[in-house]
Amino acid sequence: MSQNPVSESGPEFLVVGAGLAGLAVATTLHGAGREVMVLERADQVGGRVRTDSESGFLLDRGFQVLLTAYPELERHLDLASLNLRPFLRGANVWDGDAFVELADPRSSVRGAFNGLRTSLLSSADRIRLLRLVVQLRGSNSGFFDYSNDRSMEQFLRERKFSDRSIEAIWEPLFSGIQLTSSLEGSARLACLILRCLLSGPAAVPARGMQAIPEQMAAKLPESVIRLSSEVVGLKGDEVALATGEVLRAGKIVLATEETSAVQLLGLESKGGRSQWHAYFRTAEPPNESKAIHLFPAKDGPCRNAAVMSNVASEYAPKGESLVVLAGPTNSSELPLSAAEAQMVRTFGVQAENWELLSGAVVTGAQPMFVPGMKFRKKIGAEGLFVVAGDHSTTPSIQGALVSGRIVAESLLKD
């Protein structure tokens, strides 16, 4: 690096990455009156939480939602200013012939009544579900620690939920959330997610998910964040940019996604989980529901779908509707044909007229998290380097914000 010109007066703290973790680091340090600079390789802040605008539609990069009961949100966000648009607190579950709306009675009396009569839940399932809900509401940390963690499938089998309920409800719900092929994800993490879903609705900001990092970035002076500034090397207290510029800093925080962080540190990636998604425009919505739709794995590649314009009218131009489909994947290919055929089987011939706006596979949409992992993990960085990101905590907005705050607080103590 010494062959390139080096900035002699670098910042006290230099943060690599302007995703949610990096912004949490920067805003915490700035709020404490410390000098900080953020380098971001993209042309906007947000990392994986980004929104594109096309023909008047708002298209989040992947099917993303904000769980409003995440406890870390109030430290970093003004939720009222985000103009959140909530989903129905429940789900539309496909039973093979039609959707059955199952909902929290606080959101939908009809949905609650459906839960009492649907064949998707046996009488024993309803009792087990009620018992689980009561236990989750009374617990902040779940039922077990990481050493006793297990797969979500094992957890549900131990609690004797029926095969039908697992196939129709539990599997599409948590394979969609944890981006697992089935229910091999951590039950400990799934229970905490479920507790958040019980405590508050999922929602999206009226201006798209990117409104979240933009609100956080607005707390910082414009000079703090340098966009289109890709870091390609680290050595001592120096950071090398793709432009050839070298910056020096008192402390360097790597707040990139896991693949970039370990590459810069010369470590091995643990891999991640990927999600495919596709957005369609349609003149008429397939239904009026504001709930997320769940599809059994046997029916096709789509596990989750939502009529985003039902939830947030701002996501589509007046007179048009926006539908998003999504699911976990291990392939780099978008399963578009299979998903479209699945929608025709589900919604009928009207789905043949849906127009594709955008579709992609988001590789590494979530860092790897398997049963037995700790909620806070240390990544091999020492000396002048520290690491923040949801790969060092839990794969979620909550995890990213927590990791950023904890790193910043540790730097302030030092």
Image (tube, rainbow, N blue to C red):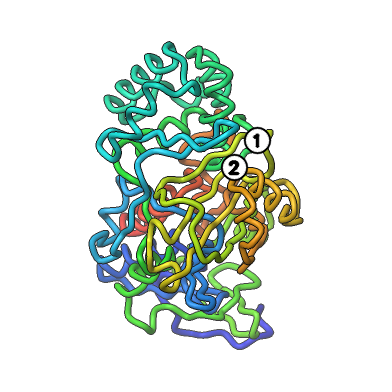
From the top left corner, tell me how far across and down residue 351 is, in percent: 62, 55
Q: In the image, what residue occupies the spot 64% across and 66% down?
A: 356
* The image quarter in which residue 95 lies: top right
Camera-side residue of 414 and 341:
341
Relative vertical location of residue 135 with respect to residue 15 in this rendering, above or below:
above
Q: Pointer 1 and pointer 2: residues touching (CB < 8 Å)?
A: yes
Q: Amino acid at mark 1?
A: Ala
Q: Amino acid at mark 2?
A: Arg
Q: What residue would you read off at disc 1?
A: 297
The residue at the point 43 percent across, 11 percent down is 124
Q: Mark 1 and mark 2: span between their CA atoms?
A: 7 Å
Q: Position of residue 318 (x, y in %)?
A: 41, 73
The residue to which callout 2 is attached is 303
- Element type where label 2 sits in the image: loop
Residue 171 locus on image (x, y percent): 57, 31
Which residue is the extreme one toward the front?
Answer: 349
Classify 10 Å Cα crowding around label 2: few (below 14), some (14-19), many (20 and above): many
Note whether residue 383 is visible.
Answer: yes
Q: Is residue 89 above or below residue 135?
A: below
Quadrant of the frame with the C terminus: bottom left
